[in-house]
Image (cartoon, rainbow, N blue to C red):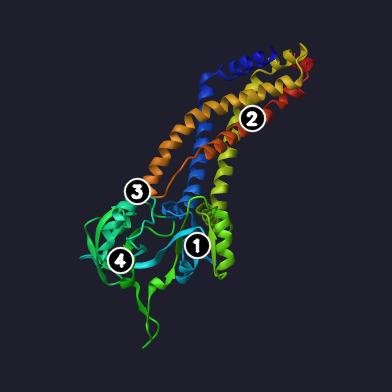
Amino acid sequence: MRAATSLTLAWRSLTHDRRRFFAAVVGIAFAVLLMIVELGFLFAIYDSSTLWIDAFDADLIMVSRHKDDMNPPNPFPRERLAQSLAVPGVVSAHPIYFERIGQWSSRGKSQRNLIRVVAFDPAHQVFKDPELATKGRLLTRLDTALVDRKLRDSYGGLYAGVEGELQDRRLRVVDDFAVGPDLQLNATLVTSHETFRRCFRRQDGPGARRLDPLDRVEFGLIKLAPGHSPRAVAQALSDRLIDDVVILRPTALKSEIHGFWTRNQPVGGVFGIGLAVGFLIGMIVCYQVLFTDVVDHLPQFSTLKAMGYPGSFLIRLAWQQGAMMAACALALGIPIGVFAFLALEDITGLVFRMTWLRMAGVIVATVLMCGLAGRLAIRKALIADPAEVF
């Protein structure tokens, strides 16, 4: 009975001044939007840094022991992949080559842009992305490439059908795909391993032999036979191979890279501060509204105390008002946040994903900030003496 009474009282007290209520909801919704955007930017940087790992078709990925980020490259010897085939359960082990400082210039333009180059053997299926898997077969012809159509605007003139030069070697872009840039590099070309070799082969000093870029692998994509445990095979590979490489599940490799960004890059702190600011803005706005409501209705609250309603009833009332404010603000802020994600993804090229877990975090934070604001605001009613009020 009292629960129903407190809910009704909380809602009527909150909405008796509709203009003030609407202004408060808008203010808190702005704080919700700020938290969503800050959270979106934080995870967009993390997610965009590992987009290529999502594109790989592999049960396990072999990388250099010193690799902690997608950039710069940290390759390992190609023979490690051949050695891995001797381990029971390993069906295939295919190399992926990365170069982050490829220089591209479109035909007829003198400007050179740094570009990431990803290379593989088009005779093998190494991508689970359907578009890359299909279009990758076009690269069997030498001196051809695919371009990421999500590249940033600084690469004007780079699109399917254009010709240009990669490392001073003529190259034709035969088609495109969609993966996306990251915070460090704005565009990506995908080539065959043979085209990669021709573009990046270099001398090991004056008069020395030419180094084969295919001898150094960035990622080894390992596929397992059905029924074999990735954990058990990864342990067997680690026991057999020299310790210059590590073998990880794709999800574990992503976690390692995200952890590197958290520990060594300032983005976590910057956007963490933004989240805290959004939380404080919402809490202050909600507190001001609810405190004003408490002051306006102090005689009514004192009457309830005089009638025998305990302080816990008023505290529950404050939490309910905070939850109501939070629900209204979320109903306004979340749809705007979704549209903001679409706009930011289009502008930045980064991947903005609002997962259910991240959405739950925003909802919990909003309910908590409004609930705390209500609890602070109701203190005046808790300490008020009914005899003094009247």
Q: Earlier in the sequence, mark 1 or mark 4?
A: 1
Horizontal and vertical percent for residue 59? Answer: 48, 54
Cα distance, mark 3 to mark 2?
Answer: 47 Å
Which residue has dot 1 on it? 62
Horizontal and vertical percent for residue 387? Answer: 79, 15
Describe the element under mark 3 as helix, strand or loop. helix
Q: In front here: 224 or 144?
A: 224
**Is residue 75 visible to us here?**
no
Q: Are marks 3 and 2 in contact (CB under 8 Å)?
A: no
Q: Is residue 205 above or below residue 78?
A: below
Extreme-bottom residue of the structure: 207
Cα distance, mark 1 to mark 3?
Answer: 23 Å
Which residue has dot 4 on it? 104
Relative to 58, 15 lies left or right: right
Neighbor class of circle 1 (other Cα within 10 Å; few <14, some 14-19, many 20+) is many
Residue at image point 62% right, 22% down: 293
Q: Earlier in the sequence, mark 4 or mark 3?
A: 4
Describe the element under mark 1 as helix, strand or loop. strand
**Is residue 296 visible to us here?**
yes
- Nearest to the eye among marks 4 and 3: give it: 3
Q: Are marks 4 and 2 in contact (CB under 8 Å)?
A: no
Q: In front here: 21 or 2?
A: 2
Neighbor class of circle 4 (other Cα within 10 Å; few <14, some 14-19, many 20+) is many
Describe the element under mark 4 as helix, strand or loop. strand
**Given the image, on which type of amino acid does mark 3 rest?**
Pro
Residue at image point 51% right, 32% down: 29
Horizontal and vertical percent for residue 196? Answer: 33, 68
- Residue 130 is marked as 3
